[in-house]
């Protein structure tokens, strides 16, 4: 949700302008905490006529097309629906030519005991020094994944599509990568094709190198297609960082790498 709003702000904010993300936490009734997220930019702004339609599906303001900014018009509609499903609110205020401000307010349970349990489990995950190849064409998704992995001292190389990922596996010595995180929908060569090409290389290393699919497609048929292509496991986007680390740990340590 936040990645979507911030991405939109960056998209419609010219070079030299600013985008701010402000996160606030305050007590609420019962066991919940109230969180307020504000995304404020000094970009092109939104017209007064279009503002009431900003969260409707397949709507894009005409001037964005004139400025050659591409998009389907679904992003903010999906974001608003997610906020609604979480019982929160989303609002926007904007001045044409001056910028926009989106505010999301959510009340979430403070599950301290679960957090402590997760922390204790993560204490035994030690992947420091492991090297992961992240095959991902989306810059924001790649930055988020790399940030999560680097917190556990995992070294991350990034490939922007499956063809580049295949080339990086080939050019480095066997054993160089401990695992591959593979996006599915990519230009040039998709994740299925790249995985099949890696598995077809000569040597046991290429047959056993853990390859984990990272995809927004999470239906049973999608998971089966990943496994059929030669991947070891699948994790759906958006993923829980703890689950990603546990899955990596199981694949790397369990594979004998």
Image: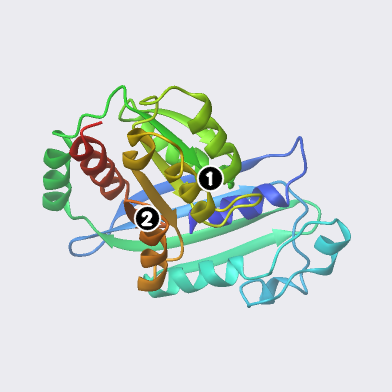
Q: Which residue occupies 66% across, 47% down? A: 10
Percent x, y of residue 63: 85, 63
Sequence-earlier tag: 1 or 2: 2
Res 173 quadrant in image: top left
User: Is the residue 105 above or below the residue 12 in the image?
Assistant: below
Q: Which residue is mark 2?
A: 35
Q: In front of the other: label 1 or label 2?
A: 1
User: Is the residue 242 above or below the residue 84 in the image?
Assistant: above
Q: Which residue occupies 40% across, 48% down? A: 24
Q: Nearer the viewer, residue 192 or 22?
A: 192
User: Is the residue 150 above or below the residue 46 in the image?
Assistant: above
Residue 161 visible to the viewer: no
Percent x, y of residue 81: 48, 74
Q: Is the residue marked by circle 2 packed among few (<14), some (14-19), or many (20+) residues within 10 Å?
A: some
Q: Nearer the viewer, residue 183 or 209?
A: 209
Left-right relation of 30 to 75: left
Is disc 2 placed on a helix, strand or loop?
Answer: strand
Percent x, y of residue 2: 49, 54
Q: Which residue is mark 1?
A: 136
Hey, which residue is sitting farthest right in the picture? 66
Is disc 1 placed on a helix, strand or loop?
Answer: loop
User: Is the residue 43 above or below the residue 167 in the image?
Assistant: below
Q: Which residue occupies 86% across, 56% down? A: 67
- Which labelled disc corresponds to residue 239? none
Res 179 quadrant in image: top left
Residue 34 visible to the viewer: yes
Q: Which residue occupies 53% across, 53% down? A: 193
Which corner quadrant holds the C terminus? top left
Left-right relation of 212 to 32: right
């Amino acid at each position: 949700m936040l990645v979507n709003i911030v991405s939109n702000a960056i998209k419609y904010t010219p070079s030299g302008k600013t985008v701010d993300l402000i996160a606030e936490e305050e007590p609420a009734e019962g066991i919940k905490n109230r969180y307020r997220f504000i995304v404020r930019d000094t970009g092109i702004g939104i017209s007064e006529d279009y503002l009431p339609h900003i969260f409707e599906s397949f709507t894009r303001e005409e001037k964005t097309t004139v400025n050659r900014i591409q998009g389907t018009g679904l992003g903010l509609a999906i974001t608003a629906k997610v906020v609604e499903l979480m019982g929160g609110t989303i609002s926007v205020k904007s001045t044409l030519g001056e910028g926009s401000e989106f505010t999301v307010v959510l009340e979430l349970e403070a599950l301290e005991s679960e957090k402590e349990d997760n922390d204790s489990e993560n204490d035994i995950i030690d992947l420091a020094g492991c090297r992961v190849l992240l095959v991902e064409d989306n810059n924001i998704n790649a930055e988020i994944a790399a940030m999560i992995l680097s917190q556990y001292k995992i070294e991350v190389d990034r490939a922007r599509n499956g063809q580049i990922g295949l080339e990086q596996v080939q050019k480095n010595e066997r054993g160089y990568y401990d695992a591959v995180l593979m996006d599915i929908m990519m230009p040039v060569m998709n994740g299925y094709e790249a995985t099949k090409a890696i598995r077809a290389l000569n040597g046991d290393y290429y047959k056993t190198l853990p390859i984990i699919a990272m995809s927004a497609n999470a239906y049973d048929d999608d998971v089966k297609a990943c496994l059929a292509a030669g991947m070891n496991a699948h994790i759906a986007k958006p993923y829980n960082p703890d689950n990603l680390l546990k899955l990596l740990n199981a694949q790397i340590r369990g594979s004998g790498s």
